[in-house]
Image: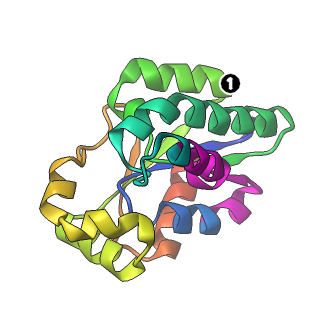
Amino acid sequence: MSTPAAVLIGGPPATGKSTLAVALAPHLGAAILDLDVATGPLTRVVSGLIGVPDLDDPVLAGLTRDARYDTLLGLAEANLRAGRPVVLVAPFSAERAQPPAWAATARRLAADPTMVWLHLPPGELIQRLTQRALARDENKIRDPASFLTGLDLKPPLVPHLALDASQPTATLVRAVLDHLSR
């Protein structure tokens, strides 16, 4: 790889995006840039200001999405300019579903980014959400049918590496590394 790698790991909640990033980053010498880690504290401030306790609420998402992704991509740009590969973790809902949004992201990163799409069957998603038992998942597991109805489980419309998230993490890392070496 002559230019630093930019690997964007997307997928529904609980597919193991962060787990894969932590396992993959050392192989690439990459910085891990997680949307929730980078922007979560400020998103919670906005949440409190508007009185919306659910971080997945569409109103809150509408107010914060552009700024959150701008922050994430800005961090990626800075690392790439410094010669540091990056592994980004986020749902990438617009970027994977809208080719113009993907093209804008690729231009901004000044790299040939790789989209990794982690997927699981709906039942396994709910099982994983239940097992991880995070406060942010309470509404999802309280009413799984509503959660799944509102979730876009379709694969990306942009070039991507689709991976079955039920595979062991080491297998997923190897698949990404093999893909990047082509």
Instruction: Examine the rendering and report whether any part of residue 36 can be seen.
Output: yes
**Total residue callouts:** 1
- Give the magenta range: 24-46
3 relative to 69 in the view: left or right:
right
Looking at the image, which residue is at 22% across and 70% down?
142
Q: Quadrant of residue 167?
A: bottom left
In the displayed structure, 150 sits above or below 170; it is above
Looking at the picture, tell me which residue is in the foreground, 37 or 116.
37
- Label 1, residues with CA under 10 Å away: few <14, some 14-19, many ≥20: some
Q: Is residue 25 above or below residue 87?
A: below
Mark 1 element type: loop
**Residue 108 point in image, percent of width and height:** 64, 22
In this picture, residue 38 sits left or right of residue 135: right
Q: Quadrant of the C terminus?
A: top right
Residue shown at 87% from the left, 37% from the top = 82
Q: According to the image, label 1 marks what residue? A: 110
In this view, the residue in front, 143 or 175, is 143
Q: Does the magenta stretch mainly form a helix, a strand or a loop?
A: helix
Quadrant (top left, top right, bottom left, bottom right) of the N terminus: top right
Residue 36 shown in magenta: yes
Q: Identity of the amino acid at label 1?
A: Ala
- For the residue pair 158 and 51, the one nearer the viewer reads as 51
Residue under the image location 53 percent in, 48 percent down: 48
Image color mode: rainbow
Please give the name of the residue rendered at 73% of the width and 38% of the height, measured from the top-left corner: 75
Percent x, y of residue 120: 27, 63
Q: Tell me where residue 49 appears, x and y as whole percent.
A: 55, 42
